[in-house]
Image (cartoon, coloured by chain):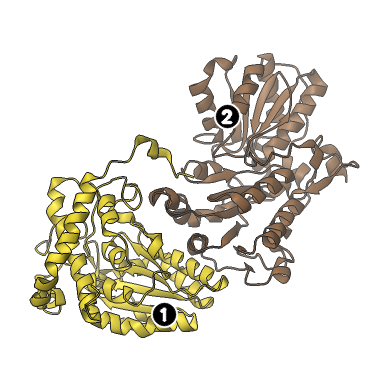
Amino acid sequence: MALTQEISPVMKATQRRVLTYRQALAAAMREALEVHPHVIIMGQGVDDHKGIFGTTLGLPEEFGSERVFDVPLAEEATTGIGVGAALNGLYPIQTHIRADFALLAMNQIVNLAAKYRYMFGGRFSVPMLIRMVVGRSWGQGAQHSQSLQSLFAHIPGLTVIMPSHPNSILDSYRHAIAQYPNPVISIEHRLMYDLQFDLDLHPAQPAAAPFGSRLVRRGDAVTIVATSIMVLEALRAADHLQEQAGIECEVIDLHCISHPDRQLVLASLAKTGRLVVADTSWKAFGVSAEVCRWVCESAPNLLRVPAITLGMAPAPCPTAKSLEDCFYPNLGTLADAVARLVTGRDDHGIALPTEVSMADVYKKFKGPF
Amino acid sequence: MRHLNHAERLFYQSLRIRLVEERLIELYPEDKIQSPVHLSIGQEAVASGLCANLRSTDLLFATYRSHAFYLAKGGDLKQMMAELYGKQAGGCGGKAGSMHLAAPEVGFMGSSAVVASSIPHAVGAALAAKRLRKDQVIVAVFGDGATEEGVFHESLNFAAKHQLPVLLVCENNGLAVHSRQGARQAYDILELAKVYGLPVTRIEEGADDQEVFQKTKSIVARVRAASEPQFVEIKTVRYKEHVGPGEDWEAGYRSRDDLVRWQQLDPLVRRADWVDRFKDQIMQEIDAAVAFAEAAPWPEESELLTDVI
């Protein structure tokens, strides 16, 4: 399909092994139920004809309604029920088709799930996986588009991941469910669901570090630390800048927001001396701020020039497409940031990608979600 | 204890809880217990009567006012005292304090200081008990104030819809901190529970451990046998202030008549002969627990960051 041709290198449709983000999620859900009898999947609409954007379709029929079931519109209790179920031997996988609705469960996530191990001196553990999907484009607006990773990652006791690739989904979900005794929040990105990914072009993580950050492109001019769909944008910007100006970008997929591999980033900065952070959320108090914090605290001398951070504009998300296109960082703003950083000039003269709307590129689907 | 009959054992447990908390009141001015204590004095019979119907494999989820339930469910007194002292030998290594007691070895599954927040945990544990075919009764204990929280409704709905083996116990002392129930609620708690199709029982005799024991016996048995939810409201009276070791009967938000009326029903007041009979033995146990807590070491600095994840 044309889309996969455009978004290289991660999505080249070749003879190599290809999988969509959605297929990886569906495979991870099915494997969890098949391998682990104590896994349940509970969430609004997990058993309907849409099946959480196709990631739970067929599972109620195959594994039974006792293991894959719909829940009331009661996010706090549902999350607390997951905590209680985990305390008594089940492994709950919970879903929020928009991350925004998880805000209704903040009491259970922050006050209970995150603290149940520590507060009781290690007497309990709460193994569970909460999937939250970030929406974007086609008028998702202020309450269907928020990328809340920094809210959760701020809280000790929570492990927050943002898979940007099917390999990350398969590695991380398998590890979380089979071995990890704590609550994991996985923030998935809706725009990636239909994209095909080349499984051989993204490093699968060793079993010891399935939540680890990933070095997904090598370069020596600049380090781009990115999250979620911004990893894909960073790779596209890197390709563009290589073709246009011979600039080689190193790209790190942070992946684990709460426990990133700082050494990987610092080692990269030791080589490049330049840092761009590209996150899917707001910059203030967020991932961008956090990466800059520990770079400043641990190795400020590695930065030869001031860092640049990219994130959403400091406003709620507007619905109008003309505004939304300005609200998010895109391929053009990212490539421009890197070019400015590497050349040290605002008028760097490097031709930028002309693409205006990222949504036009990524979006194959149209409403209602 | 072995030579006691059932009524005597219940009384012994209730008295033990009261004497433990009265010791906490004595100790509090020494400032060795640097943890907010929400005392159960006046409410002991609810815990001892109900828990006498539970097995150690049954699970109970409780609130910040949980010394009574911790002890009645079988929690270790020495570990509790050390926990209140913030010592390493506490049941939770000093990280919990009074408001977050836990003893999973006897099915006491933790206590939360955020009102109503442990109710869904009991419902979820009951879901697991049903799915995994465990022979367990799961109990949620909460106060009348908790019934005003949204999660209370959400939890009742789920428990009823899925017919889970959970006993929902409203320990109703009529107060949320200093606010009276009538000033807060436009509903009757049991009528509300009935809306969800839950079988309901009101127990007025919450002062009397025998009455609580007898009246909850068949209810616990029904949850166990039929694997279905039940709702119980047990009336009780809190003798002390909301938090802390003192009394505040003259503060104006309630009448001392409530105390006098309840004490006339309170076996721990009425049966001075039994108090005399058991007191020394209990005091020895408490002395030993206090000595244990005093002697125990503080948590090491290295424990600050253990068990975060």
Q: Which residue is mark 1?
A: B230
**Image spot of residue B74 (x, y percent):** 32, 66
Q: Which chain is yellow?
A: B
In this figure, which residue is indicated by the disc labeled 2? A262
Q: Secondary structure at mark 2?
A: helix
Residue at image x 60%, y 58%?
Answer: A93
For the residues beneath circles 2 and 1, the answer to whether they share a chain is: no
Q: Work out whether residue B244 can be spotted.
A: no
Q: Depth check: A316 or B21 in front?
A: B21
Residue B308 tag number: none
- Distance from disc 2 to disc 1, alpha carbons, whole Å, reads 51 Å
- The answer to which image quadrant residue B298 occupies is top left
Q: Quick check: A296 left or right of B206?
A: right
Q: Is residue B160 above or below residue B71?
A: below
Q: Is residue B188 left or right of residue B57?
A: left
Instruction: Using residue A305 as the reference point, say whether residue B94 is left or right of it.
Output: left
In this view, the residue farthest toward the front is B3
Q: Is the C terminus of chain A in the top left, top right, bottom left or bottom right quadrant? A: bottom right
Decide if residue B10 is on the left or right side of residue B28. right
| Residue A321 seen from this side | yes
Q: Report x, y in % for residue B132.
A: 56, 70
Residues B196 and A90: in front is: A90
At label 2, the amino acid type is Arg
Chain A colour in the picture: brown
Can you say whether B202 is above or below A9 in the image? below
Residue at 16% in and 56% down: B287
Residue at 21 percent of width and 57 percent of height: B243
